[in-house]
Image: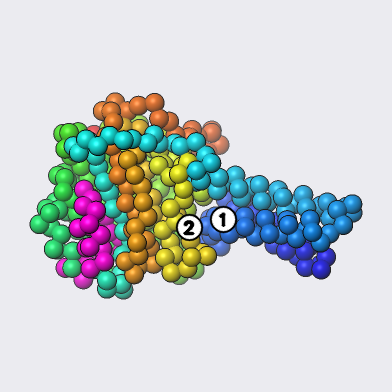
Amino acid sequence: MLLILCLCTLLILVLTLLPLSRHPHWFIRGMDFPRLQFMIFAAALLIGHLLLLDRETITAQILIFATASCLLWQLWWILPFTPMWRKEVISSSDNTAKRQLSILTSNVFTPNRNAKALIDLVKQHKPDVLVTLESDQWWQDQLQVLEADMPYSVKCPLDNLYGMHVYSRLPLDEQEICYLVEQDVPSIHVCLTLRTGDKVRAHFLHPAPPSPTENEESTERDAELVMVAKSVAKSHQPVIVTGDLNDVAWSATTRLFRKISGLLDPRVGRGAFNTFHAGYPIARWPLDHLFHSSHFTLRDIQRMPSIDSDHFPLLTRLVFTSPLGNQQEGIKPEKEEVKWSEKITDEQQVSKNDVPTPAE
């Protein structure tokens, strides 16, 4: 029994310590994803130590200390995405229709053929903007029925799992489809005009994940996130960045994105809103994101029902509160993190100047 507990403690130590290296290999970066599962494993292991070991021995004390440290470290990353944390974005009860902006983000999963489920969600909730990821020509043809109510659109149908579409009830100007880091991985950038007449700079992203079948390292994904973060950091315009970022809300790189960009995460203090994998309840994490500038407060954020994709759609309702922003503040970068962000973009030879700046 002691040997089993020692091996389990060694395992949770390795799983916890690996991401600290910041090595971009897909396996190491993948350890950012199941932090909640690691936390549960560490908690169960700690209970086992306390019940089964003689706590007077040095071996038991070392095992208990190591496991408790891993538990607390994983909890430190997870806790902000629970109601026990202070909300980063103020809740709004403003029902003024012209000040609201609702966005439905949905990775449809290209082979999925249940377009009706997504169309029904759009008709039921009437979002101002629909963003689809992994949408090919078939999906574009099916979603054409939405164009009567959502006449503004940007379409980039691809059959490589990186197609993107944006449908909107609100005017979209300065539209650009860009391939910021990889030649076959697009992003969409637009100027969105609110009903108040205010212009919003919007970026829709879907960088490729680090994985054995995609990119062996996370450098391409990280570079796209950082270059967009740097681009919006000094903007005085209202800004929204949304999409499937193939990174979890509690990873070091998503945290770096928040720090460099200065954008806010409405999930902080509310919940994780795990959108992937829809088919495996015990292995879910938040891959679909929406970040915004301090010009907005939050009306509501919801994970929508399954549309037979491997992702759940995410519906976010914002309220445009101030043309000059308000007192909401995100997290600030340390000097070492700024250097890390520069290293990421330098290695991929990309720049914030490569990112379109609609509405500027």
Type of the residue with mark 1: Leu
Vertical order, 155 against 260 (above or below): below
In the image, what residue occupies the spot 37% across and 36% down?
91
Q: Is residue 122 magenta?
A: yes
In the image, what residue occupies the spot 48% across and 61% down?
284
In the image, what residue occupies the spot 21% across and 35% down?
96
Type of the residue with mark 2: Trp
| C-alpha separation, residue under disc 2 versus residue under disc 1 | 8 Å
Vertical order, 82 against 29 (above or below): above
Q: How far from the left and from the top, in percent, is residue 107?
A: 33, 61
The local secondary structure at tag 1 comes to helix
Q: Are marks 2 and 1 in contact (CB under 8 Å)?
A: yes
Q: Which residue is mark 2?
A: 285
Q: How far from the left and from the top, in percent, is residue 357?
A: 26, 39
Q: How far from the left and from the top, in percent, is residue 302?
A: 36, 51
Q: Is residue 215 left or right of residue 54?
A: left
Vertical order, 199 against 1 (above or below): above
Task: State which quarter of the image contains the N terminus.
Answer: bottom right
Neighbourhood count class around disc 1 (C-alpha, 10 Å): few under 14, some 14–19, many 20 upward: many
The local secondary structure at tag 2 comes to loop
Residue 359 visible in the picture: no
In the image, what residue occupies the spot 34% across and 44% down?
300
Q: Which mark is residue 36?
A: 1
In front here: 91 or 213? Answer: 91
Q: Is residue 311 magenta?
A: no
